[in-house]
Amino acid sequence: MKSGFLYLMAIIDWYSRFVLSWKISNSLDSNFSVEALKQALRFGFPKIFNTDQESQFTSDDHTNKLKSREIKISMDGKGRALDNVFIERLWWSLKYENVDLNVAETGNELYHGVSNYFNFYNTERPHQSLEYQFPRAVHYKNKSKSI
């Protein structure tokens, strides 16, 4: 932001790169990560859930939500950003394609800017790794095959 900062987390489907959910917070407590997790789990339950080792992801609230659904927890090694290259690539895209070009004055502006970007990212931004398809299309095409 132009002045100050907020925390952003997102949950993506590794196969399709589809942003399942995201949240912005002014603190790193576990509440915002648990809310994003609840929202993402509406799309289904993955076999494995990968995060880094930040406190919001290692909290009992967050890990118990996964364990109760028998979802295996995978955590990146400390300082190993490339262990979760897909989310790191998402952060790069968001930063250079949106945030740096539209510096937010307020949290509300940031929220709406990120919301618009993730909608664009999911539905209009083709991905080379997906044979130039959109994440949303790949995600739902894959889900329809497994149903």
Image (cartoon, grey):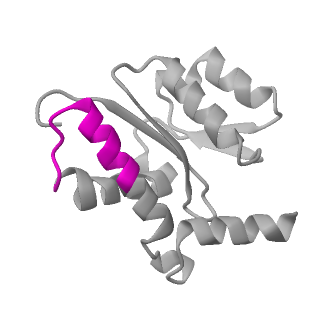
> What is the x, y in percent for residue 39?
62, 37
- Does residue 100 lie above or below 133 as drawn? above
Residue positioned 42% across, 55% down in the render: 118
Residue positioned 51% across, 76% down in the render: 129
> What is the x, y in percent for residue 3?
11, 30
Where the N terminus falls, by quadrant?
Answer: top left
Magenta-span inclusion, residue 109: yes
Where the C terminus falls, by quadrant?
Answer: bottom right
Dividing the picture into quadrants, the one containing residue 75 is top right
Q: Is residue 108 left or right of residue 67?
A: left
Q: How many marks?
A: 0
Q: Residue furthest left?
A: 2
Residue positioned 40% across, 39% down in the render: 79
- Does residue 60 lie above or below 114 as drawn? above
Magenta-span inclusion, residue 22: no
Q: Residue furthest right?
A: 147
Residue positioned 80% across, 68% down in the render: 144
- Front residue of 76 and 129: 129
- What secondary structure is the magenta-colored segment mainly? helix
The boundaries of the magenta stretch are 101-116
Dividing the picture into quadrants, the one containing residue 51 is top right
Q: Is residue 145 left or right of residue 99?
A: right
Q: Residue furthest bottom?
A: 131
> What is the x, y in percent for residue 138?
63, 71
> What is the x, y in percent for residue 88?
41, 52
Q: Is residue 75 left or right of residue 111?
A: right
- Front residue of 70 and 38: 38
